[in-house]
Image (cartoon, helix red, strand yellow):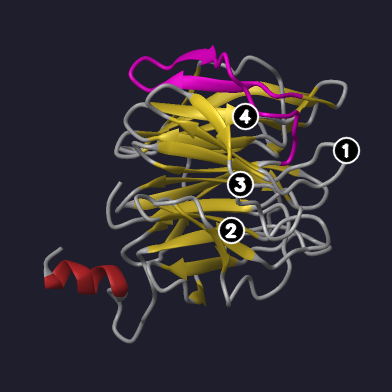
Amino acid sequence: MPLGAAKAALFGAAAGSVFVSIAGMTAGGYIGSPIDTVYKFAFPTDSRSLGTSLSEVLNNPAGMSNNGVAALVAAGGDGGTNKDIVNKFIFATDVRSTISATTSAPRRGGAACSNSGTAGYYGAGLGNSGRLDVVDKFAYADDTRSVTTSLSNAIDSLGSMANSGTAGYWGGGYRPGATTTTIVDKMTFSDDSRASLGTGLAAQRTALTGMANSGTAGYFGGGNNAGWQTSVDKFTFSDDSRTTLSAVLSVARGYMGGFADSGVAGYFAGGSGSYEDAVDKFAFSDDSRTTLAAGLAVGVESLCGYANCESL
């Protein structure tokens, strides 16, 4: 990256404003009540700072990143009402706006993934009349929203990840009747066709979180299956095969925020259990896990994650 571009990535355009842009972010969440906080974890130092807040408090929102450009944070709840709002954060300035397009229905507990440079996908969730299978597609060129191929089940509290340029994945969650599942749906970005993988999660889980090393593998971590879980399932993108890592989360939990510095490491932040503040980092080179010295400032559950990387 040229020096000028590197400086622009690190420092805000406005005079006197200093902030981190190449970073992983968490947004919203619940600490006994919903919050509007955005935390940033700088790549590669993992130092933590505060970003521009959401436009309102939201628990269980979903984040999707158009790498190098902007992130969208969609829907969520305010503790009593489901929302259809979509916040947009410009990475170069940290300026937040609310786009005119909304989600197709107010809801919380859906999951989002991104085909960077093209569109973000926000799938499923708990709506005002029950669980949904709908997938909203947000075109990054003009922030318009359409509805694309549905998931295989109406579901909420699921995880998601993407192999940018190829496919997005949604796994686990609650189906109607509050039954959990191992199903992993794959949506091919070239035509938005959807199929369910022959190999699903290693065990039924809800409240799990996804992140990905784009081009190589995606990871689903934590969640609940008759108790909070520590396990992490890894799906190799070349053949969609699944393994379960020997390294586990530092604390059994679910409802985390997930993000990744693609090519380097993936992160699971916060979560349920007892309002966790831990941020676990999995090195993609060997899938080993460390825990950041500086986690979230307070314990937060039901937050979302997204990232702006040097490259995908």
Q: What is the x, y in percent for residue 104? A: 59, 28
Q: Nearer the viewer, residue 99 or 149?
A: 149
| Label 1 vs 2, first from the N-terminus | 2
Relative horizontal placement of residue 47, taking residue 58 as reference (left or right): left
Q: Confirm or deny contact between disc 1 and disc 2 (CB under 8 A).
A: no
| Label 1 vs 4, first from the N-terminus | 4
What residue is pinned by disc 2?
A: 27
Question: Can the viewer see residue 102 in this picture?
Answer: no
Relative horizontal placement of residue 244, taking residue 20 as reference (left or right): right
- Please name the residue shown 79% across and 41% down the image: 224
What residue is pinned by disc 1?
A: 226
Q: Amino acid at mark 4?
A: Gly
Q: With respect to residue 196, does 122 lie above or below?
A: below
Q: Residues within 10 Å of mark 2 (few under 14, many from 20)?
A: many
**SS for dot 2:** strand
| Label 4 vs 2, first from the N-terminus | 2
Q: What is the x, y in percent for residue 90? A: 37, 58
Q: Amino acid at mark 2?
A: Ala
What residue is pinned by disc 4?
A: 171
Q: Which residues are magenta?
A: 181-207
Mark linked to residue 246: 3
